[in-house]
Image (cartoon, rainbow, N blue to C red):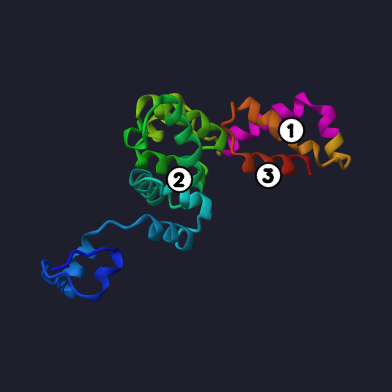
Amino acid sequence: MRSKEDAHDYRYFPEPDLVPLRISDQWLAEVRGAMPELPARKRARFVGELGLREYDADVLTQTRAASEYFETAARVSGDAKTTANWVMGDLMGMLKAAGKEIADSPVRPEHLGELVKLIATGELSGKLAKEVFPKMFATGDAPGVIVEREGLKQISDSGALEKIIADVIASNPKQVEQYQGGKTTVMNFLVGQAMKASRGQANVTAVTELFKKKLG
């Protein structure tokens, strides 16, 4: 019954005071099935299935709350990459400034997903979305509610756009002449004037196409 002197003495015989621990495959499978998805596996899935950059996937899996928020928002938006940019940029920036954690975000993940979707469908420009988001953070309202309440919906109606374009053409004869003379970069100026006149609500693609049609 000599005392053991060093750690390596324990290698040569089983500990007599401990009974053998036997784990069944069924019990192990049940435990594994009950476990949440671990960060390493989630990062790999975000990269492999959702197409995120490794850096983005790493940031979004730092906490379980962040990863779950992102996944919910991405499921609603249908655009994981753009959603990731909004979560890591605008949302986390505002949360940090307000001293809040993502679990306490005034902006629900479903609402952020809706905002990204409105941009993708052309109902809201990227510029206007940047105006809508702080209002979402301040009020907790859905983006659609804010857009309707404040009349921020993007203008795509050709009739309304043609009037704006006609006014821009009439107010900028020199630039129109330059464009028709072959200086195509002037189009950026004209589109910018139309966007300014519409308070950023005009559909940029539609405006550009209408200018080209009008100016030949």
Q: Is 108 located above or below residue 25 in the figure? A: above
Estimate how packed mark 3 is, as few (under 14), some (14 to 19) or many (20 or more) residues with alpha carbons within 10 Å: few
Mark 2 or mark 1, which is nearer the start of the sequence?
2
Q: Which residue is mark 2?
A: 117
Q: Give whichever of discs 2 and 3 has the lower sequence position.
A: 2
Circle 2 or circle 3, nearest the eye: 2
**Residue occupied by mark 1:** 190
In the rendered image, residue 64, in percent from the top left (x then y), is placed at 34, 47
Q: Position of residue 134 (x, y in %)?
A: 46, 27
Q: Residue at x 59, y 34 (%)?
A: 202
Secondary structure found at label 2: helix
Q: Nearer the viewer's eye, disc 1 or disc 2? A: 2
Location of mark 3 (residue): 209
| 10 relative to 146 in the view: left or right | left
Instruction: Identify the amino acid type marked 2.
Output: Lys
Q: CA distance from mark 1 to mark 2?
A: 28 Å
